[in-house]
Amino acid sequence: MVGSAIGRLEVWYAAECNGEWEHTYGIVIETLDNPGWRLRVDLAETTLRDVAFTAVNRETSPQDWIDCRVKDGSFQGCGGAGNLEEIITIFLGWAESYRGK
């Protein structure tokens, strides 16, 4: 799949919206105070709910780091102020590889 990380995330989200899922679940992107980003994607009632995810944890510097995992029924990714696109891309790499399985 080609396109920006945001465009690809929009496609994934739209595919999960079925008239019910989006009323209870969804995607949250927020800032952290260190500074950084957090991405949370609810996995309940999606094709990813029971799919194993290998955690990703990397710290190149105090400003360049990521920590992505599945916990409590959601994908949870955090990273430095310049790592939002990377966090989204990690989620999408996993999600797109399981689309329709």
Image: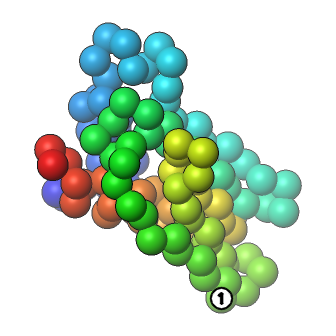
Furthest residue to the bottom?
Answer: 60
Say which residue appears at 52% left-offset and 71% top-offset.
55
Say which residue appears at 84% left-offset and 63% top-offset.
34
Where is residue 22? Give x, y as percent.
Answer: 42, 20
Say which residue appears at 72% left-offset and 60% top-offset.
36
In the foreground, 83 or 39: 39
- Way the structure is coloured: rainbow
* Disc 1 crowd, CA 10 A, few/some/many (<14, 14-19, 20+): few
Can you see residue 7? no
Say which residue appears at 53% left-offset and 42% top-offset.
73
In the foreground, 43 or 88: 43
Query: Which quadrant does the N terminus fall into?
Result: bottom left
In the foreground, 86 or 56: 56
Residue 57, quarter of the rendered image: bottom right
Element on which disc 1 rests = loop
Residue 63, quarter of the rendered image: bottom right
- Identify whether 97 is placed above or below 73: below
Furthest residue to the front?
Answer: 50
Where is residue 93? Give x, y as percent.
Answer: 31, 63
Mark 1 — residue? 60
